[in-house]
Amino acid sequence: MSRPDESAVLIEGPWTHRSVHARGTRFHIVEAGEGPLVLLLHGFPQFWWSWRHQLVSLPAAGYRAVAVDLRGYGASDKPPRGYDLPALAADATGLIRALGETGAIVVGHDWGGLVAWTMAALDPKTVRRLVAVSAPHPLRLRSALRSDPFGQLRASAHAFGFQLPFLPERRLTARGAALVGRLLDEWSGPAWPEEEATRTYREAFGILNVAHCALEYHRWFARSQLRPDGLRYARSMRTGIETPTLQLHGALDRRMLPRTAQGSGRHVVAPYRWRLVEGAGHFPHEERPGEFDTELIDWLSDPEPDR
């Protein structure tokens, strides 16, 4: 069977596809609507299409929604370096500027959420509001991995296997990326969309070099914990988040435990709101898009989001 190419992620819909350059890297973006910019950052093991529901609901509510294939994913460039969180945050900040804006509402899921938290700490003027989906504050995650061995550490066991060279890439792409489908099933709740969605993600993950680049995110986070670059990053993240923040989390998330994410509010000094999406696992924006969009758009339309 032939390997999928980047055309696999050029899925048609009520949106437009184009490429944007930022920091010397080409990014594939999908956009719809007019109004305040909402930048949508996906997680592992997905691509821009995870935001397909929000690319409809946000424009209907008066926003310009832009979903991006993160560095190394989908139809974006796949360079050998740049998979640390500060670099990924700089990518997203550069994208905002390349889109003609000085700031944006940033919505990030999973790894995209960690990037969004990092943007809000390192370059707060570019993040007008922050929405973290299934994503604890990075320092809260680091703490939980140390203090909760039978909870978050166990839930993150897959990431330790990703530290090996070569073998994880082969396992993830074998048999049409069957392991990707298994991870999606394991991490989702009973409302995971449909088998077609799983097939779409499996195909996109088979694009040349996507598996390796996606694993570089995990490798940097794990290996940098005691390295100078990781310690510098941790120090920089101690800055209180001054951006109004909404956390949306699936009540049934087995990948990133709700109790891990819930402790993130202590890092936010701006208005902060926490909401559980009942019946959803790790992908609430896909599993329960109606409930998710209601929470998101109601909060975005609130001029003074409260604690």
Image: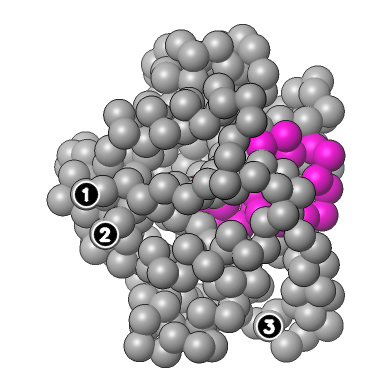
Judging from the image, what secondary structure is the residue with disc 1 in?
loop
- Residue at which label 2 appears: 252
Q: Position of residue 266 (x, y in %)?
A: 63, 65
Q: Can you say whether 37 is above or below 81 in the image?
A: above
Q: Residues within 10 Å of mark 2 (few under 14, many from 20)?
A: many
Q: Quadrant of residue 141?
A: bottom right
What residue appears at the point 37 percent right and 36 percent down from the top-left corner? 292
Q: Are marks 1 and 2 in contact (CB under 8 Å)?
A: yes
Question: Disc 2 or disc 3, which is closer to the eye?
Answer: 2
Q: Are marks 1 and 3 in contact (CB under 8 Å)?
A: no
- Residue at which label 1 appears: 279
Q: Main secondary structure of the magenta part?
A: helix
- Structural distance between the alpha carbons of marks 1 and 2: 6 Å
Picture mark count: 3
Q: Earlier in the sequence, mark 1 or mark 2?
A: 2
- Residue at which label 3 appears: 225
- Residue 76 placement, left or right of 136: right
Q: Is residue 82 visible?
A: no
What residue appears at the point 64 percent right and 45 percent down from the top-left corner? 271
- Structural distance between the alpha carbons of marks 2 and 3: 28 Å
